[in-house]
Image (cartoon, rainbow, N blue to C red):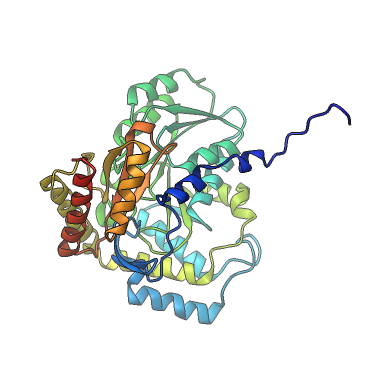
Amino acid sequence: MKGLFFLDIFKKCYDFTAVRDAKEAGIYPYFHALESRQDVEVIMEGKRRIMLGSNNYLGLTVNEDIINAGIETLRQYGTGCSGSRFLNGTLRMHLELEEELADFLNKESVVTFSTGFQTNLGIISALVGHGDYVICDKENHASIYDGCKLSYGRRLLYRHSDMDELERILKGLPEDSGKLIVTDGVFSMGGDIAKLPEIVALAKKYGARTMVDDAHALGVIGRGGRGTADYFGLADEVDIYMGTFSKSLASLGGYMAASAPVAEYVRHTSRPFIFSASIPPASCATALAALRHLRTHPEIVDRLAEITRYAHEGKRARGIRIRESEGNIPIIPIYTNDVMTTLNVAKAIYDAGVYVNPVLPPAVPESDCLLRTSYMAIHTEALLDEALDIIQSVLVRFGIQ
């Protein structure tokens, strides 16, 4: 009709030039193609790189027994389940994985989801309804934020690890409302650990339930790698553990560990669980094999802690500015300040033969950009020395020390 103006919904796409500009400048940092296994050394875009950017904390993606478990299952069950767990998509192996993980975590029941991201969507959207509140640390993972969006409750945020603000929020909520406090156990960017003892105490004081995202804690902290609650001796005090199979367990998928009634409720009401195809057979088999390996070889967690200490000490000795944190976590950020410096430093380190992850807004404030480095139990001290020497030389060249 004459005089009407129609806004093209694609306009934002045409105006989105940041990626094109970064590519033209030669500093675009994403989607580098691997041409080898996810190992401590990889071939990426035709060149050897030392991998300091993986979440493969225990190094189990290259464990031959775990690889063979996947191959054998692929031959036995085929490539996929072609259906939801609710219908034709449940294998006996899915149930075994849930039973053994529940036993490992000392919880009554486990529900497995097809991805880790989907797990947080599925748990929060199922449990938080009209009139309920979900209270979150501001540095929680994006999947927690999106799970809150899918729910019918109200999301409230507290400043990162600020227990005074958390208490102020809880104190102001109606006593007759449902309340769920959700926190990362180990925060994925900074590598710091949630103040879980204080969170649990506040939850008890104000009648809230607790949920801990242990995606970066399973296999990393706690007895034998059992996660954040176990690390603090609070295994019986946290209501829900969530985690993934794509990090320490070297596969794909996610899980919720909780009491039997809560797990059964989520299993029958969570739309992301009900309406998604189940974890493929080979992924399920490798996750189960990795869990069994972790249970029979708990010393691998000690080795991860050892190599993490070596990385911390190596950075300090080289004058590299890092965030100090509790718990010897194999996520060590290097502060590079602004966006352009971070992109240029990441590119220089990559070209010199080390892969690290640049972390930019909105994940961090404009002035707090960083390089996220992460470590594996199968790294060697010699390989870390080579990588840290490269990083130091690049930082010196850019005047960052």
Q: Is residue 248 visible?
A: yes
Viewer-proximal residue among 100 and 305: 305
Q: Residue at x 21, y 63 (%)?
A: 299
Percent across and percent down for residue 315 are 16, 48
Front residue (pair 55, 209): 55
| Left-right relation of 305 to 202 | left
Q: How many marks?
A: 0
Q: Is residue 158 above or below residue 327?
A: above
Q: Residue 150 placed where, x, y %?
A: 60, 39
**Of residues 221 and 308, which is closer to you in this image?**
308
Q: Which residue is at the far front?
A: 24
Q: Position of residue 296 (x, y in %)?
A: 28, 68
Which residue shows up at 52% across the image and 47% down it?
261
Identify which residue, 95 or 50, lies in the foreground: 50
Visible in this render: residue 217? no
265 relative to 188 in the view: left or right: right
Quarter of the rendering occupied by the C terminus = top left
**Can you say which quadrant of the picture contains the N terminus?**
top right
Residue 165 in which image quadrant: top left
Q: Position of residue 128 (x, y in %)?
A: 56, 36
Which residue occupies 23% across, 58% down? 304
Above or below, 131 against 282 in this view is above
In the orientation shown, which residue stands out farthest toward the right?
1
